[in-house]
């Protein structure tokens, strides 16, 4: 049993926002192929019990539910799970991973994508997810190093400079809310410190061209986080210029995603 949740921690991407559906669509289109390929490598199959933390729009949780059917089940948690679909084999709960308990030794697989990087209590969350694993179970975390975002091609030097300013501003906005934008680099070490073994690291470079799902996700953040950008000194005119760069097919940037998995030791 999961206890009733405490008051949810602050999180910059509010699921109650009118922008949340677009946030989840962009994430799913951009990252689901990478995420599900990595999860498949754990051997997840029919009968497994799985935990999906910070389920967001629920696309990964739904994939897992289909994968473990008919005998398995998936628990999808979120501080506000309003967007997670209700499908067979998928249990949806409101839950704050930094504060609310999980059952011990209950899951064959626990996964979170781009969740812990936002949490000031990320190490607490990681240890709790590790404790929820059965012996031989896998913890899989997909996390960005969002400070690494080089421009590979730009229509002008001005466009490249505008993108660099956008990334710098977004790092400021998110880290002021407790995020660690280079957390992806430290996930493997944190898993080791939590007692996990057989740690495997898969760094993935993800290029995005202007107008692509990845660039759409970035452009979406100028709207979803608009008020926070303005408080950081970015103007609406700046945000408009950022969106123009991110929609230009002559523009290409990339980022680094670290897909890291560790195993709960047997015995």
Image (cartoon, rainbow, N blue to C red):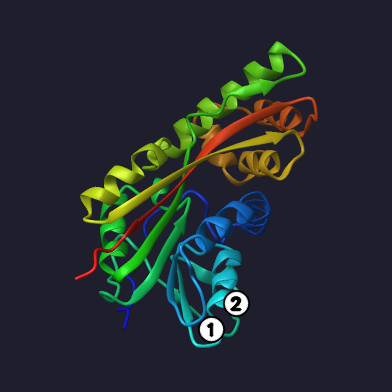
The reply to whether residue 210 is visible in this rendering is yes
Image quarter of the N terminus = bottom left
Q: Quadrant of residue 126?
A: bottom left
Please tell me how crowded label 1 is: few (under 14), some (14-19), or many (20+) other residues with Cα within 10 Å.
Answer: many
Spot the residue most to the top.
157
Task: Judge whether 183 appears above or below 70 on screen.
Answer: above
Residue 228's place in the image compared with 67, above or below, is above
Residue for point 68% across, 36% down: 208
Q: Nearer the viewer, mark 2 or mark 1?
A: 2
Q: Is residue 87 above or below residue 38?
A: below
From the top left corner, tell me how far across and down residue 242 is, in percent: 68, 28
Asked if marks 2 and 1 touch (Cβ < 8 Å), the reply is yes
Image point (50%, 60%), residue name: 41
Instruction: Count how many numbered circles sit on residues in the image.
Output: 2
Q: Position of residue 240 (x, y in %)?
A: 72, 30
Q: Which mark is residue 89?
A: 1
Name the secondary structure under disc 1: loop
Q: Secondary structure at mark 2?
A: helix
Q: Residue furthest left?
A: 267
Give me the disc on residue 20: none
Whether residue 84 is visible to the viewer of this picture, yes or no, is no
Tag 2 residue: 66
Pick whichever, 163 or 73, lies toward us. 73
> Residue at left 31%, top 68%?
136
Question: Measured from the top left, where is residue 142 in percent x and y?
Answer: 47, 50
Q: Where's residue 97, x and y in %?
A: 34, 63
Q: Quadrant of residue 235?
A: top right
Q: CA distance from mark 2 to mark 1?
A: 8 Å
Q: Quadrant of residue 25?
A: bottom right
């Amino acid at each position: 049993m999961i206890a009733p949740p405490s008051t949810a921690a602050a999180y910059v991407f509010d699921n109650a926002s009118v922008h949340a559906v677009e946030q989840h669509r962009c994430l799913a289109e951009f990252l689901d192929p990478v995420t599900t390929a990595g999860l498949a490598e754990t051997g997840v199959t029919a009968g497994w019990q799985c935990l999906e933390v910070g389920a967001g729009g629920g696309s990964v949780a739904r994939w897992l539910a289909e994968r473990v059917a008919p005998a398995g089940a998936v628990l999808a948690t979120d501080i506000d799970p309003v967007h997670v679909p209700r499908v067979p084999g998928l249990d949806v709960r409101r839950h704050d991973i930094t504060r609310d308990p999980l059952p011990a030794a209950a899951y064959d697989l626990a996964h979170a994508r781009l969740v812990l990087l936002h949490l000031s209590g990320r190490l607490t969350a990681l240890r709790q997810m590790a404790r929820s694993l059965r012996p031989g179970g896998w913890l899989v975390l997909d996390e960005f190093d969002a400070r690494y975002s080089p421009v590979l091609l730009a229509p002008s030097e001005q466009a490249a400079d505008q993108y660099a300013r956008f990334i710098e501003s977004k790092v400021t906005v998110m880290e002021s809310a407790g995020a660690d934008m280079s957390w992806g680099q430290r996930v493997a070490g944190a898993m080791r410190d939590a007692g996990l073994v057989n740690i495997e690291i898969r760094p993935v470079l993800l290029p995005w061209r202007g107008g692509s799902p990845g660039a759409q996700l970035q452009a979406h953040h100028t709207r979803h986080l608009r008020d926070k950008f303005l408080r950081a000194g970015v103007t609406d005119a700046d945000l408009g210029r950022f969106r123009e760069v991110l929609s230009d097919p002559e523009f290409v940037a990339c980022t680094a995603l670290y897909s890291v998995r560790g195993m709960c030791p047997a015995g």
